[in-house]
Image (cartoon, helix red, strand yellow):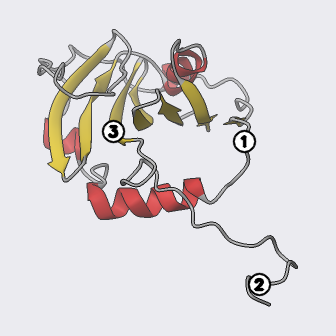
Amino acid sequence: MLPSVDVLTRGFRLGAAGFLLAGSLLGACGGDEPRAAPSPQPIDYSILAPCTDPPEPIDVRDVDGLRLPDSAYPTAVHHSGPLTQVDGFLAMTPIEAREHYATEAGVELLLLEDEGFEAEALLADGTHRMYIVVRVICATGSEFAATVGPDEPDGPTVPPRPAVTAPVGAPAAGS
């Protein structure tokens, strides 16, 4: 049996303020092209404990903009204003999750990276943005936290849009 939901999500729950801070950092990266960090050297996940039976999933069909692989077992939903975070278990490794999101149809890939034991993806579908972090917890499975919010020009976004600033060395507005 897997650890309890509290153990799966301990230290992983972002909350709106923490997520917006992380989003600000991601949004500040700039550029129009999706960024995909190269995958690290192959990871031998067999050094980890075998996975046990996945938890009983909850129904998250009402979370607009949520895009999870078929092997996802959502275990908790947290609402904070316009943002919704879904936590759970994913029956795939972070590298497999990275590959899944790299080929996800119908979305714009804004960020995709992995460090072997953790992967992150930021997707936009025209009405929502979703940021997901996937961390390995056993030989063939991971925990995940996916945060979804609106992608509106004047509303909060996931992550927030960076403030428009002058390029370094450019004169400030009104100078």
| Residue at 68% over, 71% down | 165
The quadrant of the rendering that contains the N terminus is top left
Front position among marks 1 and 2: 2
What is the secondary structure assignment of the residue under circle 3? strand
User: Which is more toward the observer, 91 or 148?
Assistant: 148
Task: Return the x and y of residue 112 as percentages of the image width and height.
Answer: 61, 34
The residue to which callout 2 is attached is 172
Q: In the rendered view, tell whether residue 117 sits above or below residue 93.
A: below
The residue to which callout 3 is attached is 148
Say left or right for 127 vs 11: right
Outermost residue toward the front in this view:
174
The residue to which callout 1 is attached is 32
Labels 2 & 3 near each other (Cβ < 8 A) = no
| Residue at 57% over, 67% down | 163
User: Which is more toward the observer, 129 or 170?
Assistant: 170
What is the secondary structure assignment of the residue under circle 2? loop
Nearer-N-terminus badge (1/2): 1
Nearer-N-terminus badge (2/3): 3
Please rate how many residues cluster around mark 1, counting C-alpha atoms within 10 Å: few if below 14, some from 14 to 19, many from 20: few
Q: Could you give the CA–CA distance between mark 1 and mark 2, rounded to whole angstroms?
A: 23 Å
Quadrant of the rendered image containing residue 171: bottom right
Residue 48 visible here: yes
Query: Label 2 amino acid?
Result: Ala
Query: Label 3 amino acid?
Result: Val
Query: Label 1 amino acid?
Result: Asp
